[in-house]
């Protein structure tokens, strides 16, 4: 079954586990775009494991104010196949381990953009994100402020076999 896009609209998935595991490991389900709208996936693990092991997923966009809470978007697109682009907008992925293991071990990741104000938390917000991607070619993190956090970007982008560009602009991830 082919679906062009999965879109979780504004102010959806408000509560723990409300949209967890959508499109997770569904045999024969191919979709190309995953859009997490504004103020979506609010509370602990609200959107965790979405598109886990998805096939032919091309783009993920997480909009402003989305994925707020403990592990709110953790494991999203973990082990996805043919994932080309990830964009995390300003104010998204806020909370402890909010983006932990995002696209971990996904194949063919080409562009990753995390905008200022995204992935801020008290700890481990992006820990292990996009780690283990064999084909990552461009990672852009403009003005990301990893605020006062222990391990906030620990192991981000580690073990990327064909990483071409890692651009960190005004970034406090050290």
Image (cartoon, rainbow, N blue to C red):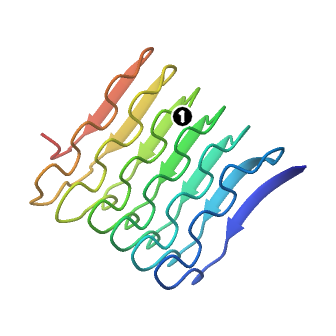
Which structural element holds mark 1? loop
Give the position of the C terminus as an image quadrant: top left
The percent coordinates of residue 13 (x first, y second) are 57, 80
Is residue 162 left or right of 120 when viewed as pictured?
right
Q: Residue 135, position in %: x, y?
A: 52, 20
Task: Please report the residue visible at 32 percent of the width from the left and 44 percent of the height from the top.
Answer: 142
Residue placed under numbered mark 1 in the picture: 106
Query: For residue 7, which quarter of the picture?
Result: bottom right
Residue placed at 15% from the left, 49% from the top? 151
Q: How many marks?
A: 1
Using the image, determine if residue 114 lies above or below residue 104. below
Q: Position of residue 94 (x, y in %)?
A: 33, 68
Q: Residue at horizontal 35%, vertical 52%?
A: 100
| Relative depth, front residue between 132 and 64 | 132
Q: Taking 160 as reference, is 20 left or right?
A: right
Comparing 125 with 87, the one in front is: 125
Locate residue 48, reporting x and y percent.
Answer: 49, 63
63 and 13: which one is in front? 13
- From this view, report whether residue 13 is shown above or below residue 95: below
Quadrant in the rendering for residue 165: top left
Q: Residue at x 71, y 51 (%)?
A: 33
Using a 10 Å C-alpha cutoff, classify the residue at mark 1 as few (fewer than 14 neighbours), some (14 to 19) or many (20 or more): many
User: Seen in the image, is 36 located left or right of residue 70?
Assistant: right
Relative to 158, is 87 above or below? below
């Amino acid at each position: 079954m082919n679906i062009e896009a999965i879109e979780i609209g504004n102010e959806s998935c408000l509560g723990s586990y409300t949209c967890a595991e959508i499109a997770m490991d569904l045999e024969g389900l191919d979709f190309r775009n995953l859009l997490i709208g504004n103020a979506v996936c609010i509370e602990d693990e609200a959107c965790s494991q979405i598109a886990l092991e998805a096939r032919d997923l091309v783009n993920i966009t997480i909009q402003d104010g989305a994925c707020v809470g403990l592990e709110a978007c953790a494991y999203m697109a973990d082990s996805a196949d043919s994932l080309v682009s990830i964009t995390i907008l300003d104010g998204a992925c806020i909370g402890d381990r909010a983006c932990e293991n995002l696209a971990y071990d996904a194949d063919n990741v080409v562009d990753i953009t995390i905008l200022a104000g995204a992935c801020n938390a008290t700890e481990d917000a992006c820990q292990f994100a996009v780690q283990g991607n064999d084909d990552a070619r461009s990672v852009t993190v403009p003005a990301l402020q990893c605020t006062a956090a222990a391990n906030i970007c620990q192991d981000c982008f580690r073990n990327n076999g064909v990483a071409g560009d890692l651009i960190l602009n005004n970034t406090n991830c050290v």
